[in-house]
Image (cartoon, grey):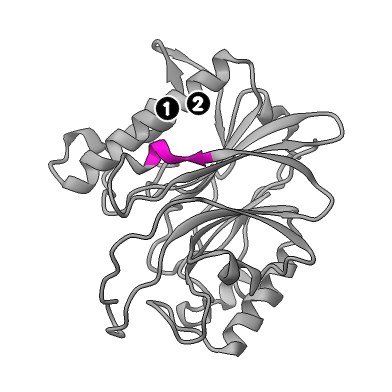
Amino acid sequence: MASWNIEHLAEYNEAGCAPRSTLDYEQLRDFSELLNADIIALQEVENTAAVERIFPKSEWNIVLSDRPNSTTYRCRGNDQESTQQRVAVVLRKGIKYQINKSFRELGLEKEGLRYGVVVEVFGDHDTINLMAVHLKSGCFVDDYSTSKLRACEVLGTQIKTLDDWIENSIRGNKKFIVLGDFNSRLTRENSMFWNKLVEMNNRPIGIKNGMQNLTGCHPRYPDLIDHIILGPQTSKLQVQNSQMVHFYSSTDEQMAEDDMLSDHCPISLMLRL
């Protein structure tokens, strides 16, 4: 399973805040094949047609959040009109799944916030609930509760919403995974976000961050904000030491910022289902 913030993936060439040529789309598609993933959570995609340019419908099933269009804005750097940002999950053909719903609760009924996507995945032996997320950006402090930034107030409400979903899943004895762009450095020791998630009624609940002890790919931002969180039962299904960050080059050391096909690198791990 993988997660990839693919940075303003638009349906048409040269559109939006990350304008791309036909060659750029081809490079993204080639790189996606190297991931060798069966399920990928995507962030910042405009619509299904945009996703199909990288993940053709002949090979993938696409589940897109039903988030309505929000007001566009002028992009920084190129002064073009922005495209929509939605969350999606793509599943390789042959994988059995059921769409639960778009998790609208993460949108907080506020324009511009992204919905989650929840999919039930049926393996040979186990079934898991998978939620893909893209949370509010702009709050990069360890303790969001002490900040007066509006972004931190919004993120704090999303955290409570996500925490409630996780706790309800545990009460229901469900196997689950939450993955995507959390816009927060959860692997830092003092992360109040992570400390909030890992306990229920002041007791540890045994969830695991599959990206612990890994470093991000971006030369200027080494702390990961993309994560794969495993529920207590799901963590037992992880293939040991399978977690990784996928660099856009043959070796980590060779990659420069200009080599990045998106401003995030994909992350992944393997589960035995």
Residue at 62% across / 23% down in the picture?
A: 232
Residue under label 1, please give it: 163
Whether residue 145 appears in magenta in the rendering, the answer is no
Residue at 56% across / 18% down in the picture?
A: 170
User: Looking at the image, which residue sits at the far right?
Assistant: 124
- Helix, strand or loop status at disc 2: helix
x and y percent of residue 188 in the render? 40, 41
Question: Between 9 and 200, which is closer to the camera in this rendering?
Answer: 9
Q: Is residue 7 above or below residue 187?
A: below
Instruction: Identify the disc placed on residue 38.
Output: none
Name the kind of residue labelled 2 in the image: Ile
Residue 198 seen in render: yes
x and y percent of residue 182 in the render? 42, 47
Question: Between 79 and 30, which is closer to the camera in this rendering?
Answer: 79
Q: Is residue 113 above or below residue 240?
A: below
Q: Are marks 1 and 2 in contact (CB under 8 Å)?
A: yes
Q: Quadrant of residue 197?
A: top left
Residue under label 2, please give it: 166
Q: Quadrant of residue 54?
A: bottom right
Residue 182 left/right relative to 140: right
Give, as a single range, the part of the protein colored magenta.
102-106
Residue 250 seen in render: no
Residue 202 left/right relative to 217: left
Name the kind of residue labelled 1 in the image: Asp
Label 2 Cα neighbours within 10 Å, binned few <14 / some 14-19 / many ≥20? many
Residue at 45% across / 67% down in the picture?
A: 218
User: Looking at the image, which residue sits at the far left?
Assistant: 148
- Helix, strand or loop status at disc 1: helix
x and y percent of residue 225 in the render? 43, 51
Question: Between 151 and 118, which is closer to the camera in this rendering?
Answer: 118
Residue at 73% across / 65% down in the picture?
A: 57
